């Protein structure tokens, strides 16, 4: 019953409902960005990027775990992040 009451409270409060929608849209955009990036970049590069961003490992930890240089980790992060930002801009333009 608490779930129903919480949903009804959101419906009664348009600002709250709007906040939920915004959060869900943002999560959707992130999922789409990751999906498109996975098609463009190698599994190694996506592994590096996901360790940095999702798992929040340090650059040194990622470099050691992936057996690459710290410079490679920074380069991959830069390339993937730039690509994902472009995708986000395109998606936000469609909203």
Image (spheres, rainbow, N blue to C red):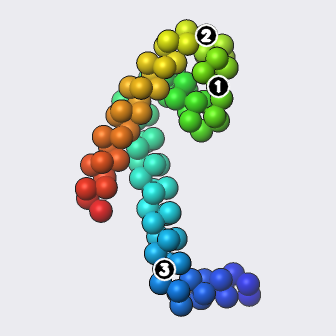
Label 2 – label 3 distance at C-alpha? 48 Å
Please tell me which residue is depicted at 52% across the width and 71% down the height of the picture.
Answer: 20
Looking at the rendered image, the disc whose residue lies closer to the viewer, 2 or 1, is 1
Residue 29 in the image, given as x and y percentages of width and height: 41, 53
Q: Nearer the viewer, residue 44 or 50?
A: 50
Label ID, residue 19: none
User: Is disc 1 surrounded by few (<14), some (14 to 19) or many (20+) residues within 10 Å?
Assistant: few
Viewer-nearest residue: 73 or 4:
73
Residue 58 sits in quarter:
top right
Question: Reading the chain from its start, which is encountered first: label 2 or label 1?
Answer: 1
Say few, some or many: other residues with alpha carbon within 10 Å of mark 2 (under 14 / 14 to 19 / 20 or more): few
Q: Is residue 81 above or below residue 44?
A: below
SS class, disc 2: loop
Marks 2,1: beta carbons within 8 A: no
Circle number at residue 67: 2
Which is more toward the observer, 89 or 44?
A: 89
CB contact under 8 Å: marks 1 and 3 = no
Graded by Cα atoms within 10 Å as few (under 14), some (14 to 19) or many (20 or more), the crowding at tag 3 reads few
Question: Which label sits in the foreground, 2 or 3?
Answer: 3
* Any part of residue 41 in sight: no
List the residue tagged with mark 3: 15
Task: Say which quadrant the C terminus sits in.
Answer: bottom left
User: What secondary structure is marked by label 3?
Assistant: helix
The quarter of the picture where residue 81 lies is top left
Q: Residue at x 34, y 34 (%)?
A: 83
Taking the image as shown, residue 76 lies to the left or right of residue 54, namely left
- Which of the image's four quarters has the N terminus? bottom right
The location of residue 17, given as percent across then percent down, is 50, 78
Residue, far right: 1
Whole-Å distance between the Cαs marked 1 and 3?
37 Å
Q: In the displayed structure, would residue 64 be above or below residue 30?
A: above
Q: Which residue is mark 1?
A: 58
């Amino acid at each position: 019953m608490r779930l129903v009451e919480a949903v009804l409270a959101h419906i009664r409060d348009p600002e709250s409902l709007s906040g939920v929608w915004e959060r869900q849209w943002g999560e959707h955009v992130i999922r789409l960005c990751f999906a498109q990036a996975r098609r463009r970049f190698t599994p190694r590069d996506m592994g590096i990027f996901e360790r940095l961003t999702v798992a929040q490992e340090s650059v040194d930890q990622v470099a050691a775990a992936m057996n690459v240089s710290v410079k490679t980790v920074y380069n991959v992060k830069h390339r993937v992040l730039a690509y994902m930002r472009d995708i986000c801009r395109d998606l936000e333009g469609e909203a």
